[in-house]
Amino acid sequence: MALQDLRPMMERCSYCAGCKFIPFEKIKSLRFAENCPSIGYYNFMTYSARGRFQLSQSLLDGRAQLDDTTTNAIHSCTSCGYCDIGCKITRYNLEPLEHNIEQKAYAVENGKILEGQKPLIDNLKKEHSMIPGTKKANRTDWAKDLNLKDLFKEKAEVAFFAGCKYSYDPKLQKVAQSAVKLLQSAGVDLGYLGAADNCCAGRAHQMGFFNEFKDRANANIKSFETAGVKTIVTPCSDCYHSFKRQYAKLGSTVKVLHIVEYVDQLIQEGKIKFTKSVPMTVTYHDPCHLGRLGEDYIPWEGKEKKILNQVHTWEPKRPRYNGIYGIYDAPRNILKAIPGVNLVEMERIREYSWCCGAGAGCNESNPEFSAWTAGERITEANTTGADALVTACPWCKDNFVNAVDEDGNKIEVLDIIELVQQAI
Amino acid sequence: MESMKQNLVDIVGAANVIDSPEVLASYSKDESFATPMKPWFVVKVENAEQVQKLVRWANETKTTLVPVSSGAPHFKGDTVPSVPQSVIVDLSGMKKIISINRQQRMCIIEPGVTYGQLQEALAKEGMTLSTCLRPRANKSVLTSVLEVEPRLNCLHQFNYTEPVRCTEVTFGDGNQIFTGEAGNGPKDLQKQWELGKWQVHSNGPAATDMLRMVLQAQGSMGIVTWASMKCELLPTIKKMYLAPANKSTDLEDFVYKAIWARIGDKLYVMNKAYLASLMGETAEEIAELKKVMPNWVAAFGLSADILLPELKVSAQEHDIMEYAKQTGVQLLPRVPGASGEAVLEKSINPSGDTYWKQTAKGSFQDIFFITTLDRTSKFIEAMYELAIEAGYPTEDIGVYIQPQHMGTSVHLEFNLPYDPNNAKEAKKVKDLYAVASREMSKLGGYYARPYDIWANIQLNKDAQSYIMLQKMKDIFDPNNIMNTGKLTIK
Amino acid sequence: MAFSREIYKALEDIVGKDNISENISVCETYRSIPAQTSAHYGPSEHWTPLPQAVVMPGSTEEVQNIIKVCNKYGIEFKASTTFYSTMGYIGSDFALQLDMRRMKSIKIDAKNMCAIVEPFAIGATVQAEAMKLGLNLNIPGVGCSASTLANFSSWVAFGPNSISMGQGSENILGLEWVLPNGDVIRTGSLGSGDGWFCGEGPGPSQRGLLRGIFGTAGSSGVCTKMAVRLHPWPGPADFPTYGMAPAYKADWGPNFKCYTLCYPDWKSWARSVQYFHESDVAYTGHRQFNMFGRDLKGAMIEIISNPDGQLADLEELLEDEYIKEQTEKMKLDYQIVIVGFSEKDMEYKEKAVDYILEQTGGWKSEMMLDKDKHDYALLYMTRLGHKNLNYVFCGSYEGIFGLSSNVWKTIEVVEDAAALKRKWEQDYNHIAATGGDSSMGSLSGIGGGGATGWEFFANFDAYDKESIRGVYKLSDETQKFHNKYAFGPDFCRWNSDLRRMDGYNFTQEEHNEFYKDSAQPWVFAYQYKIREAINPNNLCGSYFRTLDPKCLEN
């Protein structure tokens, strides 16, 4: 797929503003009505999915050029995918997220990237990690004392895949370790990829670096096959999405579970029992790639078919990713199961959740925009009166930890595994 | 002067050009404190064509025209010429009800049609027109609606301009158009009806609301020769309840609640002086009523027409009693001195030959403006204080609070009765009127209908509006011939 | 013609460097494209001209200063909020686009039932804030994604609940308005600092210069704040909804009902509408789902109320016997919402609806009584959040056959109009074949009833030039039809005299030709004089219909 191939959808955007607001039926206040971090921060139309459709036409027709402003606009998108959900509230034939990422790939192909993106990609290529400065040699340090099976050496029922952030970030390593111990204590037969544990490269895809993504994804799929991986459990939402949606497109058949799904299941089966009360009011942030972008991949090949003269449809019927079958209930089930925890909801949740700001590498390439996006969420979380903001993605957590709300206040940010751990 | 007169005779005929001293004298003043000014002629017009010719003549001769549609007496100074050698354009003879259409719930009337005349005709078709409080017997309906006299049912005042919809207007420059929806079609009512158009929509024509150019204008922009109006169905059941209170503020929650709940078809608040004036047939009776009536009364009316009337009324009665309870008021069929039924009848029917506000003392001066209900008590307190300072008896001050425009604002009216034959008393009221009018404005009272001295008071607070008004005047009445001097525009 | 550095610097000094751009890519995204034909003038194949810069003011003072700069240098300017319609875009090569998105505050006076809104406060946010306080607002038929201020001040703004709340024009209270010459007008009580509660007067109402049957679409300067009248909302303050995207639904208890009422013939239909006009029974009244077409609406309701529904299901559903039967039964229909302020009130309203049906031979659609459908329709009609389903078939539509008249006039012609459209669907493939009749719109475009506000949707594909051109030809046909039945300019031609098909403004000479022979030309001559008075440099495009009075001099 090339940008030009998306021309029909560019010209069919009806400027309805669905890409900029949470579903209009869900709006409960002026303050939290909008839902595109990019136009939210930069304000100009260009930064919305609708503006991006129009920008692509101008680029392809030669009226606009990939200058610095344009390049920045194209890459100042967290690929959070909300525009895609908002669009599909009333449209059945546009794919704004696909277009946004394709537009980024167009810029990348033309050598137009942001300064801050380079170290990420270089590190991916060289060290197989998307955290600049991290070394492949240290990737599995976090797992040293966990008694995890190396799947290249012995079989295990489930492969644990920590992802870059949990593997390298000293604060988050503890969460990954807890997750492993939690599963092990519940009797899960757990292994990992050992030396073949590499970045999923999902973020490279989000940034439009398709070649780099494909290289890494194909290598990883090969490793899964070699190691005989049937089921992967990951605490990282980016990895989850990559494996479940992007790798599946490349032929991967591995079953993918986010740790919240697995823990929820273990709680229901009575294999995880809480023994302590955690008296705390919390609110839950749905990570984009676990929630609205966490739906199963459904293979499809077909073409547009017009019926009734001009009604656009697809032959055969095309899967439609509304975001509704993402992972929303599992984390909430866990929180509700923890004694003492009182869950209060923010206004923007589930398929219309606000992004943390770290998506598509924006936390590295565009830190001010990313921090503002995170700050918006902290403001929303603090509005609920919660003691803590809980999430299920290391990128979200890291971005929130460093953010403040509009009044300069912080909020305690917890990975859901940390909360589970406190109750055991 | 004779040639001028001949010009007028050529337009309207000799019988309709009047310059007898008695008639001129009667038009030279009204019952207000406006400075008297004798007009040059009184011209009685019979149709729009004559009006247009008259306006064109006035432009050529730079003569001021003062339109008058209601019969005397007048009370607001708007029909008293402000400049010498003005010509009164008397439209009261244009009394045709041009059309009544039950299907569209519309009627079209000329300027001389009175409330009594119209309501009688409408009733035959099962309809009625929303009314202001007990209008004068010879009050022009058209003037009443163009001057936005407050309606008793604010809940059906969807548009500020209700119930007037389309009009035929000759602007001060002599050009004549239809306003509203009617301005988009042929300038011929018959032709429009043949096309199925019934002058229903007041907005426009095009991107300008021309009706608003003549609204509240005291005839200073143009002359309206017909207006279409939205009618209501004639109630088959109507009731009125009264809620007594010691203070006006005791009634606020109830009024807000009734407005919010869209219940009832009439709602207004009066103090006992005002209510007594409305109800009393003689000065003595008014005085007696004031002794027994509650300090304040909210009048709440409900009605039903053809759609399950009994069920509607029973549901609304049930609900309004509940709202009354919630807001701490008692809703009664009668209060000492008046029954709800009698108040309703007085309110909706035209006054007798003597205008009811004159009954108490022979004359009166009103001060009215727009504000919000929650601010009314501030004005009322201030008014009482000013009256005390002026030596005017506070117990004589009538107060009328009429929610309008679906309840977003209220018309607040102070009625100051006085004996016109008592020069000292008249002077006292004149002074109080001047002082209180300024004070109310300072407190935030908004003179949307700026009669007499209120024009200066209001426009001096709002220079930009003043400039815009002047621009509007330049567009629609470039030679400043329409009721020159009113609104202090020029 | 690019702005000189002097101009750019002047503008940048006003709004700050982050709120102005002259970058080509940025400016390119402020052009209206063929898909976006809600401006009802085409559709056009052309993009509107490229603005030389885009500015985003943050306050009235900034707007005023920008306009003063525009006057100083003779720059055309146009403000827009959501950029939904072509009207909001500039129309010449030396022009500045104002994007009002930074101004979006909402303040509510709950007691006196009004909200003071800035331009980018959209219907949904105003409604959400109002509902917290037991209030609601007239959301125009365009939907809740559109700006309340822009709709009320600059366009038409009637919608489903105009029958009980009045349309935009009727709901305007105080208004802050920067004229094209840079002066700031504050209308009514606001001008003298007395509050927002009244937008009329003093004396003749300046508000009448702002808009009439419609507004001037940004051609009379920039409204920066407006008090809009609010209306009662006896429902839940937090607007609870349920269900999965996109088929969200609402159940607010027994006092909130949405019915699809159906009739055997148009006369019965009109008589029933008359009953609603004459009573206070309907909270909302709209012919809504017929926008999908007489033949398709049953199937489309099935699709859109199902989270897994798709347009690919359409063909199969059209063969479904139950859907076919139900679609046939709701051929002549409309939706109403009744809202009970109490149990008794609801009992009366329910019985009143039944009585109206009994008197007119009508019935409630069985399909729409199904809880899923009912709850979907109730939410839809209350918030109008799904209004952009207007575009669902092919991405674009043009509104044709604007039947904005009294109901009796409307029903005289609706079948003939439907037949014309159906013939077009059968003879050509330019528009979606939805069954001829796709008329939709308000049961009343005026508060309290009195006039419909309808259009027929002609759905077309903006990616297909033949489809665009076909709709343009269809528009010509519908205009002939409108002339025949004396309806005046058709919906699809409402703006064709305001912007050229190449996207540029008309000249005064061209406007003179349009209006000099109109039925009442002085209407347009007065508008010329108004423009001269408030916009002496003629800087806001040609969306204000003006006729040079000299053309009327003998």
Image (tube, rainbow, N blue to C red):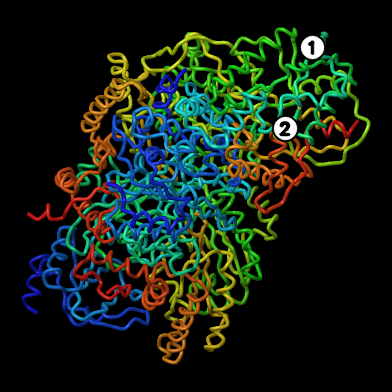
Q: Secondary structure at mark 1?
A: loop
Q: Which residue is the extreme one toward the right?
A: A275
Q: Name the subunit of mark 2.
A: A
Q: Amino acid at mark 2?
A: Pro
Residue B231 visible? The answer is: no
Q: CA distance from mark 2 to mark 1?
A: 24 Å
Q: Is residue C431 above or below residue B109?
A: above
Q: Amino acid at mark 1?
A: Leu
Nearest-to-viewer mark from 2 and 1: 1
Q: Name the subunit of mark 1.
A: A
Q: Which residue is the extreme one toward the bottom?
A: B424
Which residue does the numbered mark 2 point to in the structure image? Answer: A394
Looking at the picture, how far across and down is residue C92, in whole percent? 27, 45
Who comes first in sequence, dot 2 or dot 1? Answer: 1
Looking at the picture, how far across and down is residue C158, in whole percent? 42, 42
Q: Is residue C290 above or below residue B342?
A: above
The answer to whether mark 2 and mark 1 are in CB contact below 8 A is no
User: Which of the pair C248/C69 is nearer the observer?
Assistant: C69
Residue B295 visible? The answer is: yes
Q: Specify the quadrant of the image occupied by residue B10.
A: bottom left
User: Which of the pair A351/C367 is nearer the observer?
Assistant: A351
Left or right of C470, for residue C187: right
Q: Specify the quadrant of the image occupied by residue B355.
A: bottom left
